[in-house]
Amino acid sequence: MANQLLQQAREFTERLKHQNDISQDDIDKAKNAISSAFANSTEAEKELLQQYQQELDAVDFRNS
């Protein structure tokens, strides 16, 4: 299950990084995916999720 959630978090983050018109709802969905994946992940996966979170924060800042 964690791998599926990790993949979903990655897909949301990658899509938003390359999208110009981003809604707050899109950002919230990506953040929820990251949070959900974090709960049941390995240490290596947590490092990836932290990277996704930083990328998402940059997108959120750019979108502000």
Image (tube, grey):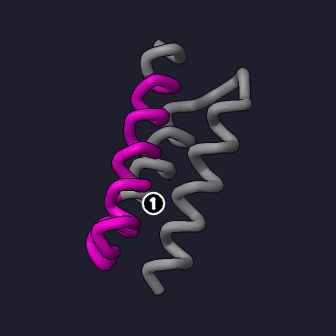
Q: Of 38 and 36, which appears nearest the observer?
A: 38
Name the secondary structure under disc 1: helix
Left of 5 or right of it: where is 17?
right
Q: Is residue 12 magenta?
A: no
Front one among 3 and 35 = 3
Q: Residue at x 50, y 67 (%)?
A: 6
Task: Between residue 33 and residue 54, name the one nearer to us.
Answer: 54
Amino acid bearing label 1:
Ala
Up/down of 3 relative to 20, above or below: below
Q: Is residue 1 above or below residue 22?
A: below
Does 43 lie within the magenta span?
yes
**Residue at 72% in and 22% down:** 20
Instruction: Identify whether 39 is placed above or below 47.
Output: below
- Lateral position of residue 6 relative to residue 17, left or right: left
Q: Neighbour class for label 1 at 10 Å: few (<14), some, many (≥20)?
A: many
Residue that lies at the very extreme toward the bottom in this rendered image: 1
Query: Magenta span: helix, strand or loop, mainly?
Result: helix
What percent of the width, then of the height, locates residue 13? 57, 45
- Residue at numbered disc 1: 33
Q: Is residue 58 above or below residue 6?
A: above
Write the residue at 47% across / 35% down: 56
Q: How many marks?
A: 1
Question: Which of 41 and 33 lies nearest the eye of the viewer?
Answer: 41
Percent across and percent down for residue 7 are 58, 67
In the rendered view, does 20 fall on the left or right side of 38?
Answer: right
18 lies left or right of 58:
right
**How far from the left and from the top, in percent, is residue 4?**
55, 78
Which segment did they paint magenta? 35-60
* Residue 51 lies in quadrant: top left
